[in-house]
Image (spheres, rainbow, N blue to C red):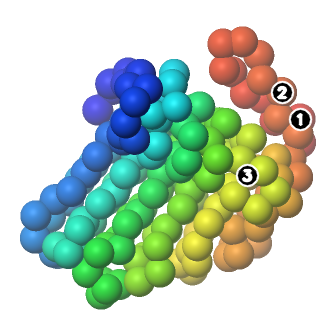
């Protein structure tokens, strides 16, 4: 909680935060909150990697700022093939200039609320099938997260240096 992480490794694909708990989601929890995670070189692959491998995990990811990652901002990996083993609650995060904003594999459950994704292109802000209850997410693209009636697409955000976002809507 409350870390400033700079992924500067230029020669290998690395994650800013890598969570791989042991046990299933009923037995393990990982909390990732109030962090600033950025990449300054090509090696920034995934900012927050929720990787339960074959064991699964229960993840709470909230109030983070993520920017400049070459692949994914927040990623939920499915290793077990059992959806009940990989569950993430992703709330109140700001993701800027990541190729994909928030992404999840099939056979995982993700609930996303009140996230802002800017600069991920028209179809990469939200990748995957999100759970019912996902709502109040915003993006500058036309990529609809698919659930919830209060999500906003095609929003205009103004970025003031250093990375301070204001919505004009």
The CA span between labels 3 and 1 is 12 Å
Q: In which quarter of the image is residue 16?
A: top left
Mark 1 neighbour class, 10 Å CA radius: few under 14, some 14 to 19, many 20 or more: few
- Tell me which numbered mark, 2 or 1, is placed earlier along the sequence: 2
Tell me the residue that label 2 is attached to: 158
SS category of the residue bearing label 1: loop
Residue 39, given in percent of the width and then of the height, sits at: 49, 28
Give the camera-side residue of 104 and 70.
70
Q: Position of residue 145 (x, y in %)?
A: 69, 68
**Residue at the spot 47% in from the left edge and 73% down from the top edge:** 105
Residue 138 image label: 3
Instruction: Give residue 95's quadrant in the image.
Output: top right
Q: Distance between the residues labelled 2 and 1?
A: 7 Å
Residue 29 image offset from top left, x and y in percent = 20, 59
**In the rendered view of the protein, which quadrant contains the N terminus?**
top left
View extreme (top): residue: 161
**Label 2: element kind:** strand
Judge whether 169 appears above or below 136 on screen: above
Give the alpha-carbon distance from disc 2 to disc 3, as whole Å: 13 Å
Whether 139 is drawn above or below 87: the answer is: above
Relative side of 99 to 167, left or right: left
Q: Which residue is tagged 1? A: 168
Q: Do the residues labelled 2 and 1 touch (CB within 8 Å)?
A: yes
The reply to whether discs 2 and 3 touch (Cβ–Cβ < 8 Å) is no
Asked if labels 1 and 3 touch by Cβ distance under 8 angstroms, the answer is no
């Amino acid at each position: 909680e409350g870390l400033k992480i700079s992924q500067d490794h230029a020669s290998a694909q690395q994650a800013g935060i890598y969570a791989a708990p042991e046990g299933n989601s009923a037995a393990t929890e990982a909390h990732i909150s109030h962090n600033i995670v950025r990449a300054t070189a090509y090696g920034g692959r995934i900012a927050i990697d929720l990787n339960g491998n074959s064991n699964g995990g229960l993840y709470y990811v909230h109030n983070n700022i993520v920017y400049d990652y070459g692949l994914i901002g927040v990623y939920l990996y499915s290793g077990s093939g059992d959806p009940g083993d990989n569950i993430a609650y992703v709330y109140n995060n700001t993701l800027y200039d990541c190729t994909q904003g928030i992404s999840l594999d099939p056979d995982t459950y993700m609930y996303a609320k009140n996230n802002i994704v800017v600069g991920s292109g028209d179809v990469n802000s939200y990748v995957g099938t999100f759970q019912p209850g996902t709502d109040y997410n915003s993006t500058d693209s036309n990529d609809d997260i698919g659930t919830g009636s209060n999500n906003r697409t095609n929003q205009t955000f103004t970025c003031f240096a250093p990375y301070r976002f204001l919505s004009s809507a």
